[in-house]
């Protein structure tokens, strides 16, 4: 894991104990910091000190040294063996119920809605910065072997571009790892050797909780409306993305490939400040997209262009980049080629949770049997409409199914209201002819019928494999 002497003796509260929260607690404790940890889920709290029985302190307990009233240290003599190394630094308590004065930071999960969660006001009142694990990584960088960091943000395409840059670096023999919004939590990974590159996928939520991440290469893919429940309008959401560049020091590379209005505005400001360079030696790559089986569609052309530019800036040569583009295997749930059956290709694009991210998938294939629906993020399919001519038939599922079925019928499309994903796969498979594509690209979130988009993708794969 990544540790830093700079954290020793400091005090942090960690709110949210999913994967990144657990890794944060472990890294801080291993660094010698004192940690108060909390999650509303008792099961998540228990995982902080697994197997000891010491992860179940009551919510009302006051942690020794961080509040007034009766002391309730996490470890009691009756609770079994004494804490393992570092565990004596970790206590459980709700940061909303303790005095945060004197803490060095409140570390929150990106999933905590800081625009409306009371922890934001609580930390502000105590004069304590609200941060995330990426900010802790930024603060630890000075103690790591010399390295570089690539930060990649945007509404759509972040995961593919991050994985592609990582794949290119690996092909070139450069030590690299992925982190942030993809892969393992960054603080839970081993430090890279000298010359390594950390490739970070960064959501706007993560950028909001980061104040000092100076990326050697910062990339913006695009900005379209999303997550607006967390921001005071679209412009505020766009400003959050732009902060990735504001944290960079002079001389570091800024790359903007998006052609949307917000991305162009950011690009113009960077150029005016002489922060964004012109593309370097990337001409001709996009003409070779037919050689990249896992990178089809106009959106992947944009993703590839961004990855190529970032790799060039990191010193990777053109022949290595060409080799890596051909061998890139793709990511699950992002235009994932699942199976070809009787000449019909089945493609899993479950990660497409809004119409803007579905549109490029429709554009990539000329003859599509489209499975869509779920928990809608918008009431329309306007972003997909320019590619309706590629849709041979549609199969709707989930809460948005009836609404989207009406839109598509009004557009003259054949629609089957399948209701659930397994039935939609069967319906589409029965109708598709050789040379056509059955595409799951829902344009919706999954939470009406599935735990998350990954579970939806797994259900699609299972249904396709079950076809005779």
Image (cartoon, rainbow, N blue to C red):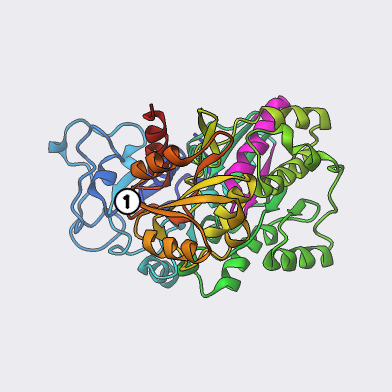
- Find residue 61 and report its horizontal and vertical position in percent: 20, 56
As drawn, the residue found furthest toward the left would be 78
Q: Residue at x 40, y 65 (%)?
A: 403
- Find residue 308 and report its horizontal and vertical position in percent: 75, 41
The secondary structure type at the circle numbered 1 is loop
Location of mark 1 (residue): 449
346 sits left or right of 13 in the view: right
Q: Residue at x 47, y 52 (%)?
A: 394
454 sits left or right of 383 in the view: left
Residue 195 seen: no
Out of 375 and 440, give the one closest to the viewer.
440
- The span picked out in magenta is 147-175
Quadrant of the image containing the C terminus: top left
Q: Quadrant of residue 454?
A: top left
- Find residue 22 and report its horizontal and vertical position in percent: 38, 42
Residue 151: say if magenta. yes
């Amino acid at each position: 894991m990544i540790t830093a002497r700079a954290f020793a003796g400091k005090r942090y509260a960690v709110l949210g104990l999913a994967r990144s929260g657990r890794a944060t607690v472990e890294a801080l404790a291993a660094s010698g910091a004192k940690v108060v940890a909390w999650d509303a889920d008792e099961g998540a709290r228990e995982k902080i000190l697994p197997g000891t029985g010491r992860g179940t302190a009551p919510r009302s307990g006051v942690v020794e040294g961080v509040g007034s009233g009766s002391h309730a240290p996490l470890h009691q003599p009756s609770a079994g063996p004494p804490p393992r190394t570092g565990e004596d630094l970790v206590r459980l308590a709700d940061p909303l119920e303790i005095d945060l004065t004197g803490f060095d930071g409140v570390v929150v999960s990106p999933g905590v809605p800081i625009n409306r969660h009371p922890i934001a006001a609580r930390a502000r009142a105590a004069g304590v910065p609200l941060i995330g694990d990426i900010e802790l990584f930024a603060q630890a960088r000075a103690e790591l072997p010399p390295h570089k960091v690539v930060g990649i943000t945007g509404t759509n395409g972040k995961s593919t571009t991050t994985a592609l840059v990582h794949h290119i670096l690996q092909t070139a023999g450069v030590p690299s790892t992925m982190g942030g919004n993809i892969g393992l939590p960054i603080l839970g990974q081993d430090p890279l050797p000298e010359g390594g590159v950390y490739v970070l996928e960064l959501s706007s939520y993560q950028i909001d909780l980061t104040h000092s991440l100076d990326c050697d290469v910062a990339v913006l893919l695009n900005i379209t409306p999303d997550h607006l429940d967390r921001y005071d309008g679209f412009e505020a959401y766009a400003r959050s993305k732009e902060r990735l560049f504001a944290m960079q020091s002079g001389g570091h590379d800024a790359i903007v490939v998006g052609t949307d209005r917000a991305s162009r505005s950011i690009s113009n400001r960077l150029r005016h400040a002489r922060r964004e360079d012109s593309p370097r030696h990337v001409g001709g790559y996009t003409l070779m997209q037919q050689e990249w089986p896992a990178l089809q569609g106009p959106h992947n052309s944009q993703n590839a262009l961004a990855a190529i530019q970032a790799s060039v800036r990191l010193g990777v040569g053109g022949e290595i980049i060409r080799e890596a583009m051909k061998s890139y295997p793709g990511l699950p749930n992002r235009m994932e080629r699942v199976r070809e059956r009787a000449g019909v290709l089945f493609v899993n694009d479950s990660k497409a949770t809004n119409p803007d991210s579905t549109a490029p998938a429709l554009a990539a294939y000329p003859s599509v049997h489209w499975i869509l629906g779920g928990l809608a993020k918008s009431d329309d399919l306007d972003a997909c409409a320019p590619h309706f001519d590629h849709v041979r038939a549609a199969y709707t599922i989930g809460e948005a199914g009836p609404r989207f079925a009406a839109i598509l019928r009004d557009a003259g499309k054949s629609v089957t209201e399948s209701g659930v994903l397994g039935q939609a796969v069967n319906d589409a498979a029965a109708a598709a002819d050789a040379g056509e594509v059955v595409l799951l690209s829902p344009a919706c979130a999954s939470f009406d019928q599935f735990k998350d988009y990954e579970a939806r993708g797994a259900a699609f794969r299972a249904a396709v494999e079950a076809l005779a």
